[in-house]
Amino acid sequence: MKLQEINKTRYRKHLNRVIAALIISLMVMGVGFGQVLIAVLSDGTGSHFAYNLAGVILAVALCLKVVHGYKDHDVSICPALFYTLER
C-alpha cells in the first residue's frame, strides 16, 4: 500500500462541506421523520419522545446507508470522504 500525496487544504475544505451536509441532513430528517411518525401513529396526547427518538434513529440509519453506499463509488460523488489525486 502506497501513501498518496494530498492537497491538505482542499481535503479539509471538502471534509468540512461533507460534515456540514451530514449535520444539516440529520437535523432536517430527524425532525421530519419524527413529525411524520407523530402524525401517523400518535393519538395526539401524551409524550412524543419515543416518536422523535425513532425519527432521529431513522435519520442516522439513512445517513449511514448513504455514506456507506458511496464508499465503493466514484470519487467525484463525495471527494472529502474518498480523496484521491486528480487524474
Image (cartoon, rainbow, N blue to C red):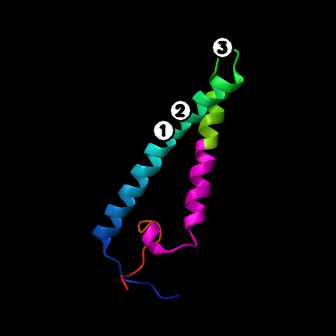
Q: Is residue 65 magenta?
A: yes
Residue under label 1: 27
As drawn, 28 above or below 69: above
Tell me which numbered mark, 1 or 3, is placed earlier along the sequence. Answer: 1
Question: Height in image: 11 above or below 25?
Answer: below
Q: Residue furthest top?
A: 45
Q: Position of residue 76 (x, y in %)?
A: 43, 72
Using residue 87 as the reference point, say whether residue 54 is left or right of it: right
* Residue farthest toward the bottom in the current orientation of the protein: 2
Which residue is denoted by mark 2 in the rendering? 31
Q: Amino acid at mark 2?
A: Val
Which amino acid, mark 3? Gly
Q: Secondary structure at mark 2?
A: helix
Q: Residues within 10 Å of mark 3 (few under 14, many from 20)?
A: few
Question: Element at badge 3?
Answer: loop
For image coordinates 56% across by 51% down, the residue present is 63
* x then y, percent, for residue 43: 70, 15
Nearest to N terminus: mark 3 or mark 2: 2
Image quarter hosting the C terminus: bottom left
